[in-house]
Every structure is written in structure tokens, then in C-alpha cells.
Amino acid sequence: MNNAELILKTLDQHLTLPVDLTLYGRAALQLGFSDPRAEYAQSMDIDGVFWMGQAEALIRSGNFWEAVDITNRELAPQGLYISHFFEESQLILTASWRQQRVPIKGPWQWLCLTRLGDKDLFLTKLMRYDPLDLADAQFILDRSGITQAEGRVIIGQARVPDIPEIREQFALCSKRFL
């Protein structure tokens, strides 16, 4: 069992109601592709994206946030954790990101897991001009078969948060793939 599976299995055990969770980051690469790189299994955390209003809905129903806290405390001795949850407006995504998600199968009782679709997962890797993120972006392109021309279209469709640092990083990263 890799780290992402262990974290999600632990979270699932603490949930009391179904939760729709969309992964991005290295956990999405590990669980969402049939041939992930070995280093993806070593990722120590889980990152998720919420549609607008989903985080508030999870506060009102079920015990998701409590289950996240319990999971983090339980796995802390191993250095594993659930860390970043962002609303869609805080990430670089396409307008149709929710319709493009890819299901992730697993032994979950309460989790309905998906990962961002290839286009959106690629775009999230263009938020930081970082060698690891750029390598991950290339992995996504290689595995998905997205051509350079299609990559240009995807970059052109991106909804970029109005945060100067993210816009600057996206511009730098985009140049590498244009």
C-alpha cells in the first residue's frame, strides 16, 4: 500500500457519510495513472480541490473535517497527512473541470474519489515554476497523449486566479510548454 492509499484508507475509516473528494497533486498522479513514477508513491500528503460551496457543505453535514483531523493525528508519527484543500477559484483550472474528473477505484466505503482530468491536472502543475512540478506536468502530457497544439489550447482556456504571484508563475511555466 502506498502513502496515498494509506492516508485515504485511514480517512475513509473515520467518515460517517459519503464524501465526494477530488484529488490533485502527486496523490492524483499515483492513484490516477496506471504507470506512475516510483517517487509518487512516496508523497507524504493528499491535496484536494473543492467546487465553490463544497467546503461549507461539508461543515454542515457529516464529519469530514473531524475525520481529516483524526486522520492527521493518527498518521503524524509516520509523517503522513492531509494538507491542502483549495476551492476551484484558487487553482488554475478549466471551466469544465468538474465534468472532466476521472474516477479512482479503491476499497473506500465512504469516499467517492476522483482526480482532476488530464487537462486540469496539467494546469495545476503550472502554478509554480518548480522543477518537480514541471516534470510532473510533462509526465501528464506524456501519459495523456496531449499534443503541443492541444497544450496551447488548454493553456489558453485556463482560468487563472487573480493573484499576481500565480499569474507570474503560470506565465513562466506556460512558456516551457508553448
Image: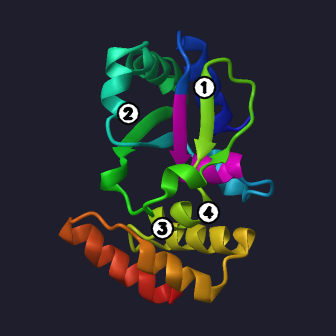
CA separation in Å, label 4 and label 1: 21 Å
Mark 2 or mark 1, earlier in chain: 2
CA separation in Å, label 3 and label 4: 9 Å
**Magenta stretch containing residue 28, yes or no?**
yes
Three-letter amino acid code at the position of disc 4:
Asp
**Magenta stretch containing residue 176, yes or no?**
no
Where is mark 2, residue-wise? 54
The residue under the point 74% across, 31% down is 106
Residue 165 visible in the shown view:
yes
Q: Position of residue 109 (x, y in %)?
A: 67, 18
Three-letter amino acid code at the position of disc 1:
Leu
Where is mark 4, residue-wise? 118
As rendered, which of 156 and 49 lies closer to the eye? 156
Where is mark 1, residue-wise? 111
Secondary structure beneath dot 1 equals strand
Please indicate whether residue 34 sits to the left or right of residue 40 in the image: right
Where 136 falls versus 3 (above or below)?
below
Mark 2 or mark 4, earlier in chain: 2
Nearer the observer: mark 3 or 2; the answer is 2
